[in-house]
Every structure is written in structure tokens, then in C-alpha cells.
Amino acid sequence: MLPSITTTALLSALAEQIRLGRVQQTQPDGYARLINAQLFPEEGIALPCGRKLQVTANIAAHWSTTRFPFLGGVRVLHISTPEQAQAEAMGLAAAMTRKNIWLALVLSNYLQLLRSLTHDGPVGSIDQVLSQLTQVSLKGVPAQYRRGGVKATLLFSLDPRTLPVEVRALVFMALGRVAGLYLPQGAGQLSVDAGCSPDDMVAAALGCSGRIDRPFAGFGPVQGGHGDPSPVTAEATLLGLNAVSPILFGQGKSLSGLNVALEGAVGKVGTAIASELLGAYGVGHLFVSDVDEARLEQRFGSMSDRVTIVPPKDDALYLDTPWDVAIPASGRFQQFGVNLATKLASANEERRTRLLAGPQNCMFFPPEVERSTEILHRAGIVTLDDAALSGGGVACVAGEGYYNTPPLSRREQQENRPVLSAAISDGFAMLIDIARQLQMPPTALFHAITDRARAVLDVGDDVFSTSSPASSPA
């Protein structure tokens, strides 16, 4: 990571070294734009160790309009194939569209409309829920929180954790060069995600320094940003899970005293969740798993009375532990397909009520999401798409402002934090409550709402497409 990019002389010198390789633009069905770029010429760049590095970038812009410029993260990958990296960018971009649309809805009058709908008794049909969308007003939703969906992946040929500081900076500056050349002016922003930091975003922003629309965000406080958004993602996640506990487990129930399984327990978001579960929420027992077993042992090895470490293989955390609530918070992509859903259902033969939800992006395999969630629903396992729960972090980044939308002040961001977390939590609980009334999987309800909302919001707005690049390569 860059120690501190207040010394931009080094980065200015690095910018002169950027020579992009092949860049290809396409428009897959349902997407505004897909950019696939070799960040360096075909031969890669030589490192001091004698090895050569090549990095492939995929930028998938799923949905972006003049009122809803996209916002989503940059994910760093190493052990993956080019095909997997591209599929991950596209899948995560679509998930970001749902997440950002839902964030705008919970900050609008939509939850109030749903409360009015449920006031006189159980909801009778999903059409009643969807019809409320025609009455939604976004007037009270700050422009910073009205966003579309995008995601980028960077596939490194070498382990990115071993790279010299200046090489990592060069990679992100090259990503910035691609974004600066090929994303339309005003289309949206890329920000921090798994494997990258606020300093990486500063390097990327310097790579496209000629742009006036700030196509990168997620900076540290020194550069006017919020810093690491992980704690806010964790906060909103836990508030939501706690809010639905009395709905699922009985009046007066909360996370306190329940058995909780947490995957990704030493990741950025997982670490914050684990601390709160063992602290303020006082769970009965915590089962943890992570691919970084050494850090897992270091963090939890001395807490065997309250924590059980589960090896990260064969989905043992979900299949072999007596959890009431399971929280996926790792970087695994499209993990819950029909195969795992069937195993989970078999492991819950007594149909005991359980809750499976967390901040892990793109939990479900899209072609199988309907079948997977239906299998879990019939087995008594309540699950909901992460996009309904994990919007706290992206909301923090959105507060940095964009293009002709000014940033929120530090004070405004601090004041908004509990409001954002409460809105996300209330929306999550509302979805699960209404889904129970309709006797349908909550994820199916959530997808129906966000799909209809996107269609409503598209009306009368200009959608960004695959027009010519913002400028031409030098």
C-alpha cells in the first residue's frame, strides 16, 4: 500500500511510464458497458525480482443514468482465471445496482408507504407491494445517495501483496488511465473494495487527472474522504440482523444468546462484525471461519469458551455447526447455488427457523437464485440477498460527492451515519416481515421490488450507453 500520497512527485513520474495494452469495449445484454483492458503491454512489466507482471482490468458498468451515476468498488484478484474475473465484475455490478436502488428507496418515503400498507393487516399480494413504487418520491433523498451499479476487478498475474509500493501505484494509475479514457464523462465512480485501500484510489485518481468528474472515490480523511467504510457496513448489517430476530425467533428475542456462524471473520468487515457480536450483542456462541487460518487462530485461539474455529473447507461452517444466524462476510463469489442450498436444507431436517444473511457481495448464483432461495425457504431457512443489508459502506463513499454534486461535510457524514444504518436495518426487517406474510422467499420479494423500481426510475432519464470513449488514447 502507498504509505501516504502527499508526495505526488513519485506518482507524477510513474504516470509517464504508463503504456496500456489491449483495451476492448463491449455491451453485453443488460449492461451499459464492459471494458476489458490489459493495463500493460503484452509482455508485462519487469520487476526487480526478475519476474514479469501483467494485470487485466474488467470494468462492468451495469446501470447508470444522468440522475443515477454509478458507484461500486474495485476488487483485487490473484487466484482466478480471466473468465472468472470478468464474470465476477459483471455479477457484482448487477448486485451493486440492486444495492444502490434499494438504498435510495429506504431513504425515500417507500418504507412509510409499506408501513401504511401493512397497518390494516397482512399484505395480500406482491402486486400491492409493487404498486407503492409509483408513489415513491426521491425529493428527500440527497443526490449523493442516488446511484447506479458498477464493479471492477483487477486480476494480477503475481501475488499483489508482494509487489513493491511503486509497482502497485503504477497498476492503479493505469486503471485510472483506462477509466479516464473509456468511461463517459459523468457516468459514475469506482471506489474501494476487497484487496484495495484509499491510497490505491488516490493513485487511480491521479492516473486520470485530466477528468473533472472525479471518477474515483473512497479516499482517506487526508484527501477529504471517509476512510475505510467497513465499520459502517458492519454496523448496518448487525442492526438489520438484530431487528429481524424478534420476527423470526419470537417476541423479545435479539442476537443476544443466539448461536452465530461468521464466515470471513478476519476480513475488514468480518473483524468489525465479530468484535460487536462478542461485545455489545453478546451472542451465545460464535463459530468462525476464514481462509486465513493463521490470523483466525491468532484472533480467536484463546477464546474457546465463546468461539469455535471451523476449518474453511467443504462449507463445514454452515453444514456442521448448530447456528441460529449465519453471516457470510467473505470474498467468495456466488457461493450459494442449488447444490449448497440442498445440503443446507438436508442439514435442517427439523425445519428449525434459521437466518442466513450478511454483507457478502453476490451470495447467490444468478441462474439458480430462484431455485436456491426456494429450497432454503421450504426448509425453514430465511435468507435475503446481501444487497438489502450491506449498503452502509457504499453510502459512506457516496457522501464524498461527485461531478456537479458537492461532497457532504465531515459533520454531515457523521450525522447521517446512524440515519443510514437505521434506514437499511428497517428496510431489511420490512422485507422479511412482508415476505413472511406473503409466504415467499424474501430474496424473491427484494428482486421483484428492485427490478420494478429500476424500470420506474429509468423513465424520463438519460441512460449512459457505449458511445465513444470520453477521449481518445494518446
Image (tube, rainbow, N blue to C red):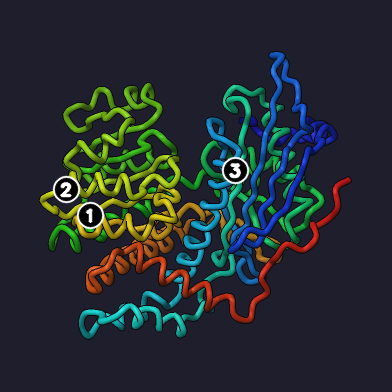
Residues at marks 3 and 1, CA–CA distance in whole angstroms: 32 Å
Amino acid type, callout 2: Asn
**x, y (%) of residue 16?**
85, 34
Image quarter hosting the N terminus: top right
**x, y (%) of residue 118?**
26, 80
Name the residue located 28 percent from the left edge and 55 percent from the top edge.
241
Residues at marks 3 and 2, CA–CA distance in whole angstroms: 36 Å
Q: Residues within 10 Å of mark 3 (few under 14, many from 20)?
A: many
Q: Residue furthest left?
A: 350
Q: Which residue is mark 1?
A: 381
**x, y (%) of residue 339?**
32, 45
Asked if residue 215 shows in the view, the reply is: yes
Q: Which mark is residue 348?
A: 2
**x, y (%) of residue 361?**
45, 49
Amino acid type, callout 1: Ile
Seen in the picture, residue 243 relative to 330 is either above or below; the reply is below
Q: Residues within 10 Å of mark 2 (few under 14, many from 20)?
A: some
Q: Secondary structure at mark 1?
A: strand
Task: Tell which circle, 3 or 2, labels the residue nearer the N-terminal end.
Answer: 3
Task: Tell which circle, 1 or 2, labels the residue nearer the N-terminal end.
Answer: 2
Q: Which residue is mark 3?
A: 153
Image quarter hosting the C terminus: top right
Q: Secondary structure at mark 2?
A: loop
Asked if residue 220 shows in the view, the reply is: no
Q: Is residue 134 left or right of residue 467?
A: left
Front in this rendered view, residue 231 or 223: 231
Name the residue located 47 percent from the left edge and 70 percent from the top edge.
451
